[in-house]
Amino acid sequence: MRINTISPARRLLLLALLALVLAVMFMTIQLHGNIGYILKHRAQILATMVLVAFAAGISTLLFQTITQNRILTPSVMGLESLFVLIQTLLVFTLDSGGLSLFGSVGRFLAETLLLVLFATWLYRWLLNGAQLDLHRVLLIGLIFGTLFRSSAGLMQRILSPGEFAILQSRMFATFTRAGSDVLLISAALIALVTLIVWRMRHQLDVIALGASSATALGIAYKRQITGLLLLISLLVAVSTALVGPMTFLGLLIVNLSYPLIGSWRHSHLLPGVVLVALVTLLGGQMILERVFDMAGTLSVMIEFIGGGLFIFLLLKRVAK
């Protein structure tokens, strides 16, 4: 059977089966020693991957839908750069003992709240006029991202080697950081946003047609886009505070999802990007563990592949 003849629903079913098989393999392969501890540890990693799959996949799909651009990701809004700046400020102003006073839950909530507040302020400022200018939103986001990265880089040069080592452990994404209490809070927030987005799936099909067509078909375009940008910011904030910045994960999985799902309807794409993200994360983690013997981290491997895809898409766009 040719893949072009398979319906999007069956493709989703095949992806779901593949994700389930990979999840079972991840939980059970080489299971020896203290089985209770190992299962708990792997279950937390799996839960983290599921949450990141939802957050990264849905946020990037929504962002590309409203910008009508397959190269852009929510990271251009500067949220991940702000996360790095927040971590740098905490290490710069507090010692390791001061950092431990916040606790994992308090630190997670504070980081998420700061990221969402910044996004809310930015969007209210930029979208306050009569006209919605997404190009201005993206440009200002890039400027803020550059400002945050430069400020963080300046402070990092002043840190002592020990403080910089502490900072590095927070700057790079890892799926083993979050505890069960943080995972529960993240799951509640992501589930709420996912439910809201799923109820909007048919409106998203219309928004993808562009501002003029969406307005002509009865969509309150500016209000919907403002709400979607805030939902995107919440997803990115939760994902970044949960595991750290992963700039190219969303770009990689969403651009893989378009040909794999074979549909432009968001009722197919929304579950599709989550399943592709989960397959990518689980498959990458198992390859890293079994083939490369953990000689590296999953986030670095994904950023390398995603960065290569970004360059390819950019060159392909320029060549047209």
Image (tube, grey):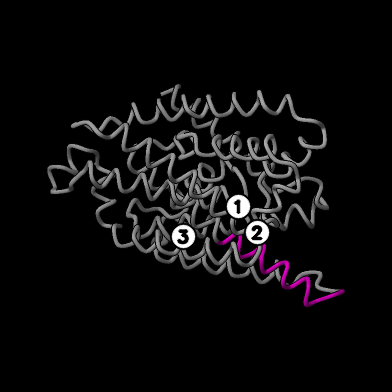
Which residue is found at the position 67% from the left and 62% from the top?
45
Whether 195 is drawn above or below 221: the answer is below
Q: Give the SS element for disc 3.
A: helix
Residue 11 seen from this side: no
Task: Give the residue furthest to the right.
Answer: 33
Residue 178 — which label?
2
Residue type highlighted by circle 3: Ile
Q: Position of residue 65 (x, y in %)?
A: 35, 44
Which numbered disc flags the more N-terminal residue, 1 or 2?
1
Magenta run includes residue 46: yes
Q: SS at mark 2?
A: loop
The reply to whether discs 1 and 2 touch (Cβ–Cβ < 8 Å) is no
**How far apart are the two marked residues, 3 and 2, measured between alpha carbons?**
15 Å
- Which is in the foreground here, disc 3 or disc 1? 1
Q: Amino acid at mark 2?
A: Ala
Residue 187 in the magenta stretch? The answer is: no
Q: Nearer the viewer, residue 188 or 108?
A: 108
According to the picture, the residue beneath numbered tag 1 turns out to be 107
Bounds of the magenta segment: 33-50
Q: 211 or 130, which is in the foreground?
A: 130
Tell me residue 259's x, y (percent): 45, 48
Mark 3 touching mark 2, by CB under 8 A? no
Which residue position is annotated with label 3?
190
Residue drawn at point x = 47 percent, y = 33 percent? 76
Secondary structure character of the magenta stretch overall = helix
- Badge 2 crowding class, 10 Å Cα cut-off, few under 14, some 14 to 19, many 20 or more, is many
